[in-house]
Image (cartoon, rainbow, N blue to C red):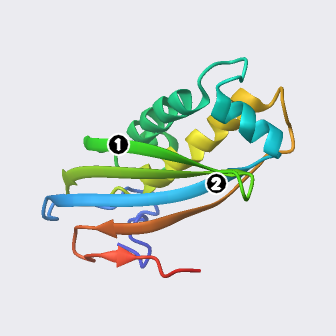
């Protein structure tokens, strides 16, 4: 194997071999946001977006995205997830929705990518459902907040 663990001696790209790693409970929490005009946020909160219930649809999209992360991200292991949950916090003061995803599994590798993917796709779904109302929405600040399990143990993001 070369210095890069995903490239073998023949130059082939490979997934990292997790066969020998211990199966432990793994959890990751990711967070992000979508910013918008106050009127757009009011329509989401009041349930008056033409396409339907924005938070329910975004939650389903985020869960499905977490389950499909191995299909979307090259070299990411497909995982049997045991829990995926998303929450949405409408922040009227800053005219945004804060999105948080919590993902769990019991396995040989972590679920950070699944949590980050869930947040990203949930934000994209909110954008899609509201783009007829506003096209200037911005998605950002997507980050890993904490993770636990595995050899590297616990990680908690320091406050910015």
Front in this rendered view, residue 112 or 156: 156
- The answer to whether residue 90 is above or below residue 29 is above
Residue 63 in view of the camera: yes
Which quadrant of the rendered structure holds the N terminus? bottom left
Q: Residue at x 86, y 38 (%)?
A: 135
* Left or right position of 82 against 50: left
Dot 1 and dot 2 residues touching (CB under 8 Å): no
Mark 2 residue element = strand
Mark 1 residue element = strand
* Left or right position of 160 against 156: right
Q: Residue at x 66, y 29 (%)?
A: 46
Residue 73 in view of the camera: no
Q: Which residue is disc 1 drawn over?
A: 84
Q: Residues within 10 Å of mark 1 (few under 14, many from 20)?
A: many
Q: Earlier in the sequence, mark 1 or mark 2?
A: 2
Q: Residue at x 75, y 52 (%)?
A: 95
Report how far apart the C-alphas of labels 1 and 2 lie in the structure.
18 Å
Front in this rendered view, residue 112 or 137: 137
The location of residue 41, given as percent across then percent down, is 73, 40
- The answer to whether residue 33 is above or below residue 137 is below
Q: Which residue is disc 2 drawn over?
A: 33
The label nearer to you, 1 versus 2, is: 2
């Amino acid at each position: 194997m070369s210095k890069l663990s995903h490239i073998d001696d023949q130059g082939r790209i490979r997934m990292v071999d997790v066969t020998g790693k211990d199966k432990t409970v793994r959890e990751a929490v990711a967070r992000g946001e979508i910013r918008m005009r106050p009127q757009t946020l009011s329509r989401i909160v009041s349930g008056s977006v033409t396409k339907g219930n924005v938070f329910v649809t975004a939650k389903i999209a985020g869960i499905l995205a977490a389950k499909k992360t191995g299909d979307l991200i090259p070299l990411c292991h497909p995982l049997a997830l045991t829990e995926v949950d998303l929450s949405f916090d409408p922040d009227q003061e800053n005219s945004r929705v804060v999105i948080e995803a919590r993902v769990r599994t019991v396995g040989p590798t972590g679920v950070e990518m699944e949590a980050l993917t869930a947040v990203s796709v949930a934000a994209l779904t909110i954008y899609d459902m509201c783009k007829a109302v506003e096209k200037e929405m911005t998605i950002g600040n997507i980050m890993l907040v904490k993770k636990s399990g595995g050899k590297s143990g616990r990680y908690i993001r320091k406050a910015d």
